[in-house]
Image (tube, rainbow, N blue to C red):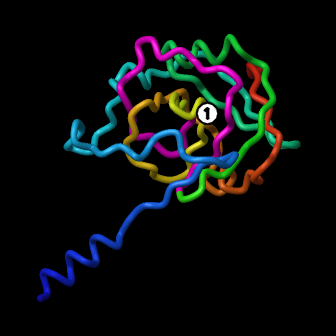
C-alpha cells in the first residue's frame, strides 16, 4: 500500500510550463535520457569567454554580458542594437526576450543546462533567456554569455519591460 501511495504522489509531481506572450509553449521540457549524468550538453568550448561584451538595458539599469566564443553569440552581436520586451517565463526562473528573427545554430550543442546567472538562446522559442535559477536541460538551448547581475536583479526585471540589447562600451 505504501508503494502505491508513493507512486500516486510521484504522479502528481509535475513541473509547470508557460509561454511568454500567450499560446502553447514551443517545446516540452526535455528528458535527460541522453545526458544521464545531468551535465551540461554544451561542450567546454561553448562556454569559452571572448573579449566581446554586450549591454542589456532595462530602464536606467544596465547589465554587462561577457559573451562566449561561439557562433550563436557572434550572430547575436551582428543584430545589435535591438529593443524587445522582457517577459517572465511562468514556472521557471528566467526572463525571456523574443527575437524577431532566429539566430544561427551552426556549431551549437544539441542542448544545454544553463549556469546561473547566465544568458542563453532557446532556438525553438526564438528567444534570449536571462537565467536566475535552475531550469534544467533542454534541447535547443545555447549558452551566450555570463551576465554581471545578481539573481535578485534579474528576478526584479518587470514583466513587459522594454529591454535594449546593444554592444557594450569597453
Is the N terminus in the top left, top right, bottom left or bottom right quadrant? bottom left
Residue at (64% x, 30% y) in the render: 65
Determine the residue located farthest toward the front in the rendered image. Answer: 23
The stretch in magenta equals 92-119
- 69 relative position to 85: left or right: left
Q: How far across and how far down the image is residue 51, in percent?
A: 59, 16
Q: Residue 133 appears at what percent x and percent y?
A: 51, 53
Q: Residue at x 47, y 28 (%)?
A: 142
Q: Quadrant of the C terminus?
A: top right
Res 30 quadrant in image: top left
Magenta segment's dominant SS is: loop
Q: Element under label 1?
A: strand
The residue drawn where x is 33% and y is 36% is 40
Is 32 a magenta residue? no
Determine whether, in the image, residue 122 is placed left or right of residue 4: right
Q: Position of residue 70 (x, y in %)?
A: 48, 16
Q: Residue furthest right?
A: 60
Pointer 1 residue: 128
Towards the viewer: 148 or 114: 114
Residue 107 is inside the magenta segment: yes
Residue 161: x and y in percent read 81, 46
Characterize the local packing of mark 1: few (<14), some (14-19) or many (20 or more) Cα atoms within 10 angstroms. Answer: many
Question: In this image, 22 relative to 72: left or right?
Answer: right
Count of labels shown? Answer: 1
Q: Is residue 96 above or below residue 101?
A: below
Is 142 rendered above or below residue 87?
above
State the residue at coordinates (66%, 15%): 77
Amino acid at each position: 500500500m505504501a508503494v502505491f501511495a508513493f507512486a500516486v504522489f510521484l504522479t502528481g509531481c509535475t513541473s509547470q510550463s508557460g509561454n511568454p506572450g500567450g499560446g502553447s509553449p514551443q517545446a516540452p521540457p526535455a528528458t535527460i535520457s541522453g545526458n544521464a549524468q545531468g551535465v551540461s550538453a554544451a561542450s567546454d568550448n561553448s562556454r569559452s569567454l571572448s573579449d566581446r561584451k554586450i549591454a542589456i538595458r532595462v530602464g536606467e539599469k544596465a547589465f554587462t554580458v561577457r559573451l562566449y566564443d561561439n557562433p550563436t553569440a557572434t550572430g547575436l552581436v551582428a543584430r545589435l542594437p535591438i529593443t524587445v520586451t522582457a517577459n517572465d517565463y511562468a514556472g521557471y526562473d528566467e526572463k525571456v526576450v523574443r527575437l524577431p528573427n532566429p539566430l544561427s545554430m551552426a556549431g551549437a550543442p544539441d542542448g544545454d543546462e544553463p549556469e546561473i546567472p547566465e544568458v542563453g538562446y532557446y532556438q525553438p522559442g526564438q528567444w534570449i533567456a536571462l537565467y536566475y535559477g535552475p531550469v534544467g536541460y533542454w534541447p535547443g538551448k545555447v549558452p551566450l554569455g555570463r551576465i554581471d547581475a545578481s539573481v535578485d536583479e534579474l528576478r526584479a526585471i518587470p514583466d513587459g519591460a522594454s529591454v535594449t540589447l546593444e554592444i557594450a562600451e569597453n
